[in-house]
Image (spheres, helix red, strand yellow):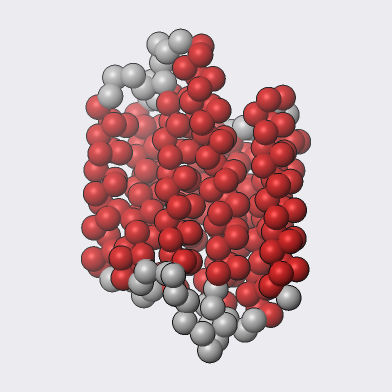
Amino acid sequence: MKKTFNIVNIILITLVLVLASCYTALGGLWIKSLASAGFVVLMGVNLIYALKIKTDKWKFSIVMLVGHVFSMVGDIVLNIEFMIGAIIFAVGHIFYFVAYCFLNRFKWIDLIPGAIIFVPSALVITLVPLFDFGGIFMKIVCVVYALVISLMLGKAISNLVRDRNRLNIILVIGSFLFFFSDLMLLFDVFGSGMSPMAYIIFDTMCLATYYPAQCVLGYSLMLLPKSTEKSEI
């Protein structure tokens, strides 16, 4: 059974990355929407796998799928109304954070990695003169968003420190790619006074890491242990 699901994963991941490449080269909201829908289907397929093996981590699986749905909607809305799209994305990150807490119960010490990531991120947003947010409200939105995604990445790192297994390694990789993608988006959308080539580079790097991040997170459910197993590296 797992072999069949792995083949389906390969097909879906390839499809998402091909669509993402087409969107990067050609643009078009409909192509972006198809790519985003693709990683939700990927997560949905792997949720079916997780339920079939009767994993104890079914709550993690379901909440991850909800996070993916919010990411898909946020990804699409971002092109129409940036602020609303960013808020929807932030909600998706909150669901990812909650999902990670179902893997390893939340402890206050989990906030330390997130804080270490957030502080320099907030300083970059608020102090670097390169950015033009068009007003204090958008700057606040970006800082709050940075807090949410920093806590998400921090929780993934904390889980890996507490429990070193393949699943947590994959979640750290996916979360980091997501964080890096959003950092590139920050420069692409709010950077001012840069050369046209710089904008192209930041936009390309944003997309080149965003869709792989979603595919990695979507694949993570394939690494869930059965109810009688313990996941190891």
Camera-side residue of 10 and 66: 10
Can see residue 129?
Answer: yes
**Relative to residue 76, is residue 190 drawn left or right?**
left
The N terminus lies in quadrant: bottom right
When the figure is inspected, residue 152 is found, relative to residue 144, above or below; the finding is below
Q: Residue at x 27, y 55 (%)?
A: 113
Where is residue 69? Give x, y as percent. Answer: 63, 55
Where is residue 62? Give x, y as percent. Answer: 59, 70
**Relative to residue 101, is residue 19 drawn left or right?**
right
Q: Residue at x 40, y 11 (%)?
A: 193
Residue 156: quarter of image: bottom left
When the figure is inspected, residue 29 is found, relative to residue 144, above or below; the finding is above
Camera-side residue of 71 and 104: 104
When the figure is inspected, residue 50 is found, relative to residue 71, above or below; the finding is below
Residue 124: quarter of image: top left
Can see residue 37?
Answer: no
Q: Residue at x 73, y 61 (%)?
A: 7
Where is residue 163? Give x, y as percent. Answer: 35, 72
**Relative to residue 82, is residue 80 drawn left or right?**
right
Where is residue 141? Give x, y as percent. Answer: 40, 39
**Relative to residue 119, is residue 164 drawn left or right?**
right
When the figure is inspected, residue 31 is found, relative to residue 217, above or below; the finding is above
Q: Residue at x 76, y 36 (%)?
A: 30
